[in-house]
Every structure is written in C-alpha cells, then in structure tokens.
Image (cartoon, rainbow, N blue to C red):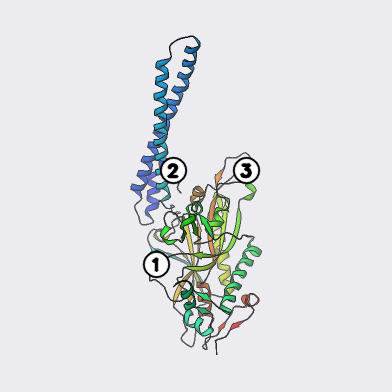
Amino acid sequence: MLDIRRLREDRAGVVAALARRGEDFGPAVDRILELDESRRTALTEVNELKARRNSVSKEVGRRKREGLDADALITEMREVGDAIARLDDEAAIAEAAMREGLLDIPNTPLDEVPAGGEDDNVEIHVRGTEPSFDFTPRPHWELGELLGILDLGGGSRVTGSGFPVLRGWGARLQRGLINFFLDRHVGAHGYEEVRVPYVVNRASMTGTGQLPKFADDSYQVERDDLWLIPTAEVPVTNLHAGSLLPEDEVPRRLTAYSPCFRREAGAAGKDTRGLLRVHQFDKVELVRYERPERSREALDELTAEAEGLLDDLGLHYRRVLLAGGDLGFSAAMTFDLEVWSPGVERWLEVSSCSVFTDYQARRAELRFRPGAGERPEYVHTLNGSALALPRTVAALLETYQDEDGSVRLPEVLHPYVGTDRILAIS
C-alpha cells in the first residue's frame, strides 16, 4: 500500500501519478486523509487526557495521604477514563477505515510509465526471427489433436471448461520446460528454488495485492478461508511477511514452480480456444527482494533473464512497456514479453515482469535492516513469469510445426523431453 506520510506530504503528486492509470483517485485519497486527521486528532486528545490523568492521580494520592477530600478528583478521573476509552475506539475505527481505503488504492507508476491504456503500451524491442511456412500453419489446438497430446474434452469431463489435460509427449514437454526453466534460474542466475503451498491465507493474498481487489477472480476454500494461488508470487513473496531481514539477506532471489488458479471472472468469452485462456495453468515464477536504490535496475535484470529463455527456445518475441492504464494493481512498472504464435497470428503474453517498489512490502510488513545499527526499511519486491505455460507450449507447437502436423523441438529441450520431435498420430 502507499505510505500515508507520502499522501500527507504530496497529495497532489500522488493523485497526479495515479491519474496516469486512467482514473481519478483524488476523492479516495481525500477520504483517507480525512480519516488520518480524525485518527491523529483523537490520539492527540488521548495523550493529553492521559497526561491529565497521571497528574491528577498523583494529586489524589497526596490528598489521601494527608487526609484531604479527593472525591471530586476521583469523579473527574472516571470521566477522563471514559473519554479515553471513547477516543481510543474512535481512533481504532478511523485507522481501520483508513487501512481499508489504502488497500483499495493501487501503486503509483514510475515516471517512465506512459499514461493511457493498452493502445499506449510501448514496444521496446523485437527479438528472434519471425517463422515462415510454405503451408498454412495450424493453430495449436489442431496440432494438439493431431499429435494426441492435448485433451480438452477430458479436462471438461473431469472439472469443466478451462482445465485442459496434456497427454503423453505433451505432458513430457511441459514437464521438460519447467525443469529447463528452473535449472536455468538456479544454475545461471543464482536463484534459490523453493517449493511452496498452493493454498494461502487471506493475509498472504492481501499482502501481494490480490485482495480485496481481485476476490472475484480467485478460487476460495470458504470453509477454511484459504485461497488457491493465482501465481507463486503470492506464497513466495510472503515467505518473510512480518519479518525483519538482516542486511546480508537482501537482495534475495527465489524461484518456484507452481500450478496457478484463476477464475478469470472479468474475461468471460475471451480467447477460449485451446490453451490461450484457462483456469489452471503451470508457471515458473521469479521473485526478488531488493534494496530500494537498485530495484529499477533489478527489473531490467529480471526481464533479461526471462528473455534469455525465449532466446534459447528460438521464439520470435517482443518486450512491451505497459502504460499506466494497463498496469497491474500493485505494480509500479511492468515489461510484458510476448511471443509470436503463427497459428493464431497473434502476440501471446508469456511473461509479465514487474517492480512493486515498497507497495507489497508495506502490505506484508516485509522489512530489512540496511546495515548494523541502521533503522529498518521496507524492501522493494519484484516478480516475473519465467516462463508461463501453457502459452509457451502453444507458441512452440505453432512455431516448430511441419506440414504433416509433427513438431520439431528446440535443441535445448531434447535432453529434458527425451526426443527431438513429436510425431503426428498416423
């Protein structure tokens, strides 16, 4: 969440920054500041009354020792005690409402982030060679049927639409990609691999910004008030929630594989063919805790690490800087990586790499000590998909297809999958 002191000191600057998201948050900010003023006023009065009570208590004790009447002062102190209790309640109510309001305000974009919506996103660069064919390339769902690796009907029977089943070489391809990604992040980039729970509590979802904003897009286990994770970002970022990390533990790099669960309540009817938009999918996630002074630099590093996977897979892709109106709720700046998928003739997002500044850390109370004897600070958090499946699988199948429907695999995957080609069923 945003720092309340920042709102007090630079209300106009915060509102102007948030306006680049395409919304006017002025009234919401003003309401928070009103609650903050009420809370502070109540606490000031409480402190004054407590000082009065301490002073009078001493006087009551003196009078009793000297045999003097103290009944009037005792009555006054009862009234003071009642006033303190009432003001404490007022302060607590105002603070709770203020926190609730802060949880509903998104992060402020960095200065580099352009204003506007999706149409104002900026293409940073394009890499790789666009695939060409002397035949009409098939979409991945047709290839999946020819290869016998994609079973959409089976998933529908077991659960419902949006829960695909991968079979045979399809399952091995996905497993091979996950292992390749994890090996690269651990071996080449120094990430620590972690295995995390796939259900989390409400505090964890709130800490990374999924709640309360995206409750309708999430799957909840209502009986236990637990939530299926929409991304490994949630449990990994919250591993040290409420902690004070020592100076030698920041920066820290963590990577995790997990299934991801999203209801996609706001995307009904969009991209429903094949693997383009599903309710359960696999992803390898990168999470960083960084010192504030180098978090922006770390975003470039993290994004380049995800791009390196696409380079090794030989996919045609681009990096896109998201405009404010297309920015995720908690993000201060985001690069999307999109691969060209020739069968559907579209760019498909396979990675979203973001820096959150101290926004998530304030919600999750994730702090570190910069040096011995120094005051604690909030870490800056980052995360990125590296990479998300199944769109990576879709792009691979469509990019490396042959006319008969068989699919060649990039050389880097041969030892991970156990074959260099997936053959069409005869």
Which one is in front, 346 or 202? Answer: 202
Q: Between disc 1 and disc 3, whose residue precedes?
A: 1
Q: Label 3, on which residue?
A: 371
Residue closest to the eye, 68 or 294 = 68
Question: Which three-letter amino acid code belongs to the residue tagged 3?
Answer: Gly
Name the residue located 46 percent from the left edge and 68 percent from the top edge: 279
C-alpha distance separating marks 1 and 3: 46 Å
Vertical position of residue 71 compared to residue 188: above or below: above
For residue 46, above or below residue 330: above
N-terminal label among 2 and 3: 2
Residue visible at 44% across and 43% down in the picture = 4
> Disc 1 on helix, strand or loop?
helix
**Label 3 element class:** loop
Numbered disc in front, either 2 or 3: 2
Q: Nearer the viewer, mark 2 or mark 1?
A: 1
Q: Badge 3: few (under 14), some or many (20 or more) residues near its Cα, within 10 Å?
A: few
Q: Residue at x 47, y 75 (%)?
A: 157
Q: Which residue is mark 2?
A: 4
- Give x and y (percent) for residue 103: 43, 49
- On the question of residue 353 being in view, the answer is yes
Image height check: is 335 above or below 341? above
Give neighbour class at mark 2: few <14, some 14-19, many 20+ (Cα, 10 Å).
some
Mark nearest the camera among 1 and 3 is: 1
Image location of residue 127, percent across then percent down: 52, 72
Is residue 197 rendered to the left or right of residue 415? left
Disc 2 residue type?
Ile
Q: Residues within 10 Å of mark 1 (few under 14, many from 20)?
A: few
State how far apart marks 2 and 1 are (Cα): 33 Å
Look at the numbered discs 2 and 3 and tell me whether their residues touch, using CB distance below 8 Å.
Answer: no
Q: CA distance from mark 2 to mark 3?
A: 25 Å
